[in-house]
Image (cartoon, helix red, strand yellow):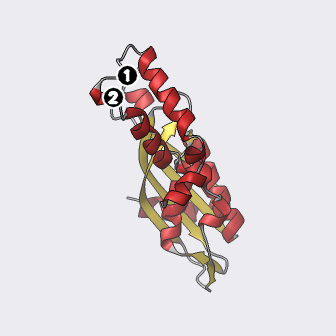
Amino acid sequence: MSSTEYKNSLVGKNREQLEYHVREILRLLGEDVDREGLLETPARVTRMYEEIFAGYDADLRDVLGVTFDERHEELVIIKDIVYYSQCEHHMAPFFGKIHIGYVPSGKVAGLSKFARLVDAVTRKLQVQERITSEIADILEDVLKPHGVMVVVEGEHLCMCSRGVKKYGSKTITSGVRGSFRTDSTLRSEFLSLLK
């Protein structure tokens, strides 16, 4: 990201306020905010926020970019797209893999655009259920495919490292649209190809 893009980003516009509040949180935790190891922490945290919350600056409809006319109307799967997000309830990280399947109806998008869409949706405060629905809805809206299915696997640190502390537990959600909803054979084919 260029310096101009950073200044125009949501975090860039609010940089001074974010740094001030990070410093205040450290102070309220009992830290000496003037000690050497913490002097640059507010700026580092703000730069980290720019990266992990970049989804707030994304226009989800534009992420898929240019679509291409193709006559291919068979199942397309993009699987194992790694994502990192932040739980909106505890601001704790969660991460995992997203698998996308769709049956084009004349339009396809470049394969890297699916990873960009995942990043745009997940790089903000989120819940896994919303991630699943947003990705499925955007793909349905922009590509107008015969069907879309999205499966999201997630490991949530708000459940693993605090509270019940169940390390290694995973949450799996799915979003089903169009022909995937009505065609159990198509759903089964998609799920079997994920293994």
Disc 2 crowd, CA 10 A, few/some/many (<14, 14-19, 20+): some
Amino acid bearing label 1:
Val
Q: Position of residue 139 (x, y in %)?
A: 64, 63
- Residue closest to the eye, 99 or 18: 18
**Circle 1 is placed at which residue position?**
33
* Residue at position x 53%, y 50% in the image: 54
**Which structural element holds mark 1?**
loop
* Image quadrant where residue 194 sits: bottom left
Label 1, label 2: how far apart the Cα atoms are: 6 Å
Q: Is residue 107 left or right of residue 160?
A: right
Amino acid bearing label 2:
Leu
Image: 42 above or below 193: above
**Which structural element holds mark 2?**
helix
Whether residue 177 is visible: no
Image quadrant where one finds the C terminus? bottom left
* Residue at position x 53%, y 34% in the image: 18
Image: 45 above or below 177: above
Q: Position of residue 118 (x, y in %)?
A: 52, 56
* Residue at position x 53%, y 54% in the image: 6
Whether tag 1 and tag 2 are in contact, CB under 8 A, the answer is yes
Q: Is residue 1 left or right of residue 67?
A: left
Image: 174 above or below 77: above
Tell me which label, 1 or 2, sits earlier in the chain. 1
Whether residue 193 is visible: yes
- Residue closest to the eye, 36 or 143: 36
Q: Position of residue 13 (x, y in %)?
A: 60, 45
**Circle 2 is placed at which residue position?**
38
